[in-house]
Image (cartoon, grey):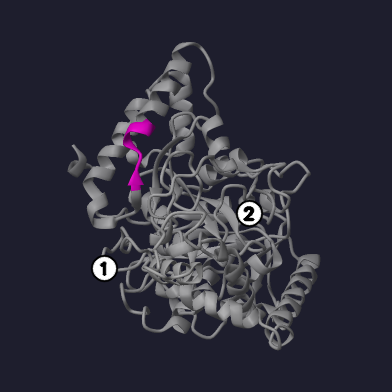
């Protein structure tokens, strides 16, 4: 294996390790050196798993030496969002209320990655309980965008996106409830995937909004993202929402091109109010590139998509208010006693007041109100009706098109602190990604050029349920046509 270790693709690393051309230990040390050089500026991780990762890498090298195949991701370092349970290793959701809590089990995706030979290099920072679009809501401080340390990486999986963009790991896992993989992928210039709801088991993912949450990969290349998704997808008896049928193979048609495919550019997303002109321009250029490659590209309308943001911010907080009720000082993590003479209610109140941050409290109150007697039908019930309309509009569009196309985020990465005092402005960052979460469909962001400020822009590829194979086919074509993106300013010399 030649070239800078942190820039090699996951597929390349795994092939070299399986052939014995490089050891998993050497691959790991290259990436740990990269973390050592840049982590203090980026803050991608809540925890770097140095000792655990070295043990995993040594086990893989031992398997290779014994003539055994460690798996399709052999020796590939992978960063895990800190809302995925890891047995005996702190899992915090970037919240004080779970600080120091160690799960007694691994999430299914963690088990499957280990079985595939991947090496978990760390737990990444996130907006507390995955609530946010900038990774500024972490109780442990914000993550910074490797392309410009004065700007956000997006959220809530900003730590995972930044880790891949900075070269700390070739691949990472995040969770996507309203765009929390795709939006930070776009802002950090990497590939980010939200699979079909139920394709990847949610067992061991700490719930935010259960009907929307999905685990998905970040990668530097479309091929790497496909390899990780293929490794983690499939039925799981421990998750009742896990799909029972065999999963589509994401990596099956990466090199077949797009000749003959029907692709619709969603007019409501590409032309929505608040989408910056350079984002619209890159989206149009991406559509033209697919057309030049042989696809039939036309405009398509998905009218209800523009109501997705309003519906989401009733449904997701309602589910969050229920899911987060379990953090009461009895079962997990933080407990703040009420003092002499205080009852258990006082202990609950003090624990939750001290343990949750402002954004989590805001969404719990919003969700509790939407579910309360007298308002349920007017707010939560109406939002579910809008969700049904969105599903129907997408189904109508997919009768005429194989794939839909649109922007991923309204703009490029914004300065730290620019939107923290205006929650509505922050929520608008997810306006392009939320519709596919409400529909349960797959979607992914692929880097495609930069804005006027030189920062990355992502184009979103959307597909019908279980349409991952075609989605990755189009994404690979887009990747091949995309302008090259400058590497973040963490130089190779800095780690020597």
In the displayed image of the protein, which residue is found farthest to the top? 66
- Residue at 50%, 71% in the rendered image: 345
The location of residue 41, given as percent across then percent down, is: 23, 56
* 96 is higher (above) or lower (below) than 435: above
Q: Residue furthest front?
A: 341
Q: Residue at x 48, y 68 (%)?
A: 348
Give the x, y percent position of residue 247: 72, 43
Residue 174 lies left or right of residue 252; in this view the side is left
Residue 415 vs residue 85, the one in the foreground = 85
User: Residue 151: horizontal and vertical position, in percent?
Assistant: 31, 68
Q: Which residue is mark 1?
A: 150
The label shown at residue 439 is: none
Q: Which residue is pictured at 53% across the width and 86% down the height?
A: 273
Query: Quick check: can you spot residue 381?
Result: yes
Gap in angstroms between the C-alphas marked 2 and 1: 31 Å
Nearer to us in this view, 460 or 124: 124
In the rendering, at what x and y percent does residue 21 appear? 40, 20
In the depicted structure, whether residue 489 falls above or below residue 396: above
Mark yes or no: residue 167 visible.
Answer: no
Up the image or down, 216 lies above or below 52; here it is below
- Image quadrant occupied by the C terminus: top left
Q: Quadrant of residue 442?
A: bottom right
Per the rendered image, the range of residues in magenta is 47-53
The image's mark for residue 195 is 2
Does the residue at mark 2 contact the one at mark 1 (Cβ under 8 Å)? Answer: no
Q: Secondary structure at mark 2?
A: loop
Which image quarter holds the N terminus? top left
Q: Is residue 55 magenta?
A: no
Residue at x 72% of width, y 41% of height: 237
């Amino acid at each position: 294996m030649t070239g800078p270790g942190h820039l090699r693709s996951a597929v390349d690393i795994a092939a070299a390790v399986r052939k014995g051309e490089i050891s998993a230990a050497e691959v790991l040390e290259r990436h740990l050196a990269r973390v050592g050089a840049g982590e203090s500026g980026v803050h991608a991780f809540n925890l770097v798993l140095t000792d655990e990762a070295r043990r995993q890498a040594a086990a893989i090298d031992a398997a290779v030496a014994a003539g055994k195949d460690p798996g399709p991701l052999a020796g590939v370092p992978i960063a895990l969002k800190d809302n995925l349970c890891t047995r005996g290793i702190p899992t915090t959701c970037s919240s004080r209320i779970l600080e120091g809590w160690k799960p007694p089990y691994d999430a299914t995706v963690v088990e499957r990655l280990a079985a595939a030979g991947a090496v978990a290099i760390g737990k990444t920072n996130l907006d507390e309980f995955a609530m946010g679009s900038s990774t500024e809501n972490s109780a442990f401080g914000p993550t910074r965008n490797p392309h410009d340390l004065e700007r956000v990486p997006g959220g809530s999986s900003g730590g995972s996106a930044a880790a891949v963009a900075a070269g700390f790991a070739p691949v990472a896992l995040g969770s996507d409830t309203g765009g929390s993989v795709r939006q930070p992928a776009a802002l950090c210039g990497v590939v980010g995937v939200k699979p079909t709801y139920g394709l990847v088991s949610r067992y061991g993912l700490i719930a935010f909004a259960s009907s929307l949450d999905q685990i998905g990969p970040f990668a530097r290349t479309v091929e790497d993202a496909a390899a990780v998704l293929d490794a983690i997808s499939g039925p799981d008896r421990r998750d009742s929402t896990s799909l029972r049928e065999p999963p589509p193979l994401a990596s099956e048609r990466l090199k077949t091109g797009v000749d003959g495919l029907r692709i619709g550019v969603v007019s409501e997303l590409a032309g929505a109010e608040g989408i910056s002109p350079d984002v619209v321009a890159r989206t149009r250029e991406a559509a033209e590139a697919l057309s030049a490659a042989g696809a039939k590209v036309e405009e398509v309308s998905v009218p209800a998509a523009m109501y997705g943001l309003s519906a989401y911010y009733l449904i997701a907080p309602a589910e969050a208010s229920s899911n987060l009720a379990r953090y009461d000082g009895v079962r997990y993590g933080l407990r703040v006693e009420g003092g002499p003479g205080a009852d258990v209610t006082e202990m609950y109140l003090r624990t939750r007041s001290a343990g949750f941050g402002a954004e989590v409290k805001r969404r719990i109150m919003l969700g509790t109100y939407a579910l309360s007697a007298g308002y349920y039908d007017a707010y939560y019930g109406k939002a579910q009706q809008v969700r049904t309309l969105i599903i129907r509009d997408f189904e109508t569009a997919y009768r005429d098109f194989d794939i839909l196309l649109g922007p991923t985020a309204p703009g490029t990465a914004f300065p730290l602190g620019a939107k923290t005092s205006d929650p509505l402005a922050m929520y608008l960052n997810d306006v392009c990604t939320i519709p596919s979460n409400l529909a349960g469909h797959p979607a992914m962001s692929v880097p495609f050029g930069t804005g006027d400020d030189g920062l990355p822009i992502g184009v979103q590829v959307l597909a019908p349920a279980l349409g991952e194979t075609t989605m990755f086919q189009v994404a690979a074509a887009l990747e091949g046509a995309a302008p090259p993106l400058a590497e973040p300013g963490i130089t190779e010399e800095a780690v020597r």
